[in-house]
Amino acid sequence: MKTTQRNPPYLFTIVFISGWLISACSTMSVYSPEAYKQAVNLKIESLDLMSFATKSYNDYDEQVASLRTELKKAYEFAKGRPNNELSTNQWEILIDENRNLLGGFLKRWKEEETLSEMFILETQLLVSDAFDTIIGLESGKLDASELK
Amino acid sequence: MPNFNDFILTLKDDLLEFAKENLDEYKDELLKDGSEFVKKTKKDLERWTEGLAAGTLSEKDFEFLLKGKKDLAEMEALKQLGLSKIRISRITNGIIDVIAGSAVKTFL
């Protein structure tokens, strides 16, 4: 009889804790194969185009414009996904022209017409690592089937 | 007949074991990532300083790379923050399993 009287409070506690835990699970977006593929492809395309920056920017104007469009698409795709603020912030930093990664590099190339070989190689290393942070976060996300 | 106190005792033991396994693993991963970033930064700075001295990098290039490293550190921090949240989600899923397992062990 005593056990029966104790049931409601502790059952309520278990249900409350479980509910809180389940709601805590949904604070990050789930893994998106499309976002992962997009980041990998853009990493390769960006590093490839950067290697031509010893040559005149005018000869690569169209390729840069096309890459910028693809980068913006990736950013907008990240921004549109629910609970995806951290990945969106990563894309923002990477493509921002006023920062010093891919966006800043493309801006400098345009402004200075050509860039030095060592500067290109060293920025490529940074941009490669920057893409890896995006790819690493995406691949670490839970699959939709893992959410309870 | 098992009561709520038995359940709490079982749950406490199960949760302690679960937390120890998961938090130790997480701490090791975080320390490894952090020390690798510091090592890499040190090597980068050495190369950039040599490049600046040799004239293969301009002062503007050097400054850009330094700021770029700061931006990269910010992106790395966002990744680590995200992975921590994901880790919490995984642990939370595990805790739900532990609670259910402890309840089954105690009451069934």
Image (tube, helix red, strand yellow):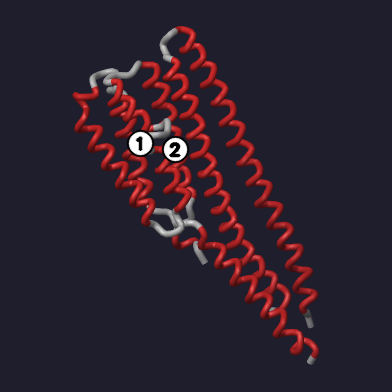
* Relative depth, front residue between B19 and B79: B79
Residue A50 in the image: state x and y as whole percent: 32, 27
Q: Which mark is residue A102?
A: none
Q: Amino acid at mark 1?
A: Lys
Task: Provide the chain ID for the residue under circle 2.
Answer: A
Q: Residues within 10 Å of mark 2 (few under 14, many from 20)?
A: some
Residue A97 in the image: state x and y as whole percent: 36, 35
Left or right, B85 with respect to A111, comes to right
Kindly indicate whether the residue at mark 1 contacts the one at mark 2 (C-beta within 8 angstroms).
yes
Mark 2 / mark 1, whichever is N-terminal: 1
Q: Which mark is residue A132?
A: 2
Q: Dot 1: what SS?
A: helix
Residue B93 in the image: state x and y as whole percent: 58, 62
Please say if A7 is above or below A20: below
Q: Amino acid at mark 2?
A: Asp
Left or right, A41 with respect to A126, comes to left
Residue B73 in the image: state x and y as whole percent: 52, 35
Residue at position x 75%, y 73% from top?
A: B7
Residue at position x 56%, y 53% from top?
A: B85
Q: Residues within 10 Å of mark 1 (few under 14, many from 20)?
A: many
* Relative depth, front residue between A33 and B80: B80
- Give the quadrant of the C terminus of chain B: bottom right
Q: Which mark is residue A43?
A: 1
Res B12 → quadrant: bottom right
User: Of all residues shown, which one is farthest toward the bottom?
Assistant: A1
Task: Provide the chain ID for the residue under circle 1.
Answer: A
What distance separates the C-alpha of mark 2 from that of mark 1?
A: 8 Å
- Give the quadrant of the N terminus of chain B: bottom right
Answer yes or no: are tags 2 and 1 on the same subunit: yes
